[in-house]
Image (cartoon, rainbow, N blue to C red):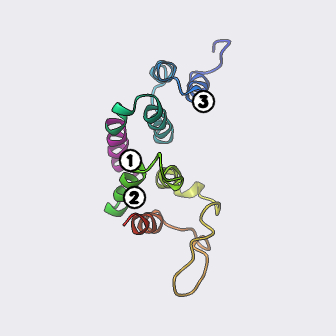
Amino acid sequence: MTSQGSAYARFRRALKTGNLTLIRNAAAELPRVELGDALEVCVAIRQAEPERFERAALRWLARFCVERGGVTLAQVQAAAWAFDNITDEPAALETLQRLWAPRRNWSGTGHAQLRHRRTGELGMRHGISTVAIATTVVRWAM
C-alpha cells in the first residue's frame, strides 16, 4: 500500500473531485468497478463530458440487467427514466441508487412515504421490492 492508501481509497477520492482523468486513472488500478461506483462515474461524466453521458448510461443499464439478474422491464424503464432526468429531477439519482442497491441493505429511509393504496400501510413493513419502486417511478414519469 502506498502513502496515498489503497487503490479503492484513491478511486473514492478521485470520484469526490469529479475530475474524469483522475477517476479513470484510479479506476484502472481496480480489479473491478462495482455497479454503485459505476453510477457515480456516470454522474461525473454527465457533468464533465455530457456528450459521452448517453453511452455511459447505456453501459450502466446493460451491467444492471446482467449483474442484478431477474431485472424487470419496469425496472429498466425506471432506470432509463432516471438517467434521462438526472439533471432536472432530484429523485432520479435516488431512484438509480435504490434500483442497484442489494435488497438486504435496504433500510426504511426514503421508502417510508410509499403507502399501500388501499390499506394505507407503509411499504417498508416487510421490505419494499425493487419492482414496487420502479412501478411508482414509471407512473410518475408518464
In this view, which residue lies farthest toward the front? 88
Q: Quadrant of residue 57?
A: top left
- Please state the extent of the stretch shown in magenta in the rendering: 55-70
Q: Quadrant of residue 74?
A: bottom left
Q: For the residue carrying disc 2, how many other residues have a C-alpha within 10 Å: few (<14), some (14-19), or many (20+)? A: many
Q: Is residue 133 left or right of residue 50?
A: right
Q: Nearer the N terminus, badge 1 or badge 3?
A: 3
Q: Residues within 10 Å of mark 1 (few under 14, many from 20)?
A: some
Main secondary structure found in the magenta portion: helix
Q: Position of residue 21 (x, y in %)?
A: 47, 18
Which residue sits at x=45%, y=30%? Answer: 32
Helix, strand or loop at mark 3: helix
For residue 53, what is the image quadrant? top left
Magenta-colored stretch includes residue 60: yes
Q: Nearer the viewer, mark 2 or mark 1?
A: 2
What residue did someone put label 2 on?
78
Is residue 134 rendered to the left or right of residue 103?
left
Gap in angstroms between the C-alphas marked 3 and 2 = 26 Å
Which residue does the numbered mark 1 point to in the structure image? 64
Task: Quickly name the residue at label 3.
Answer: 16
Decide if residue 70 is in sight here: no
Label 3 Cα crowd, 10 Å radius (few <14 / some 14-19 / many 20+): few
Which of the two labelled residues, at mark 2 and mark 1, occupies the earlier sequence position?
1
Q: Amino acid at mark 1?
A: Phe
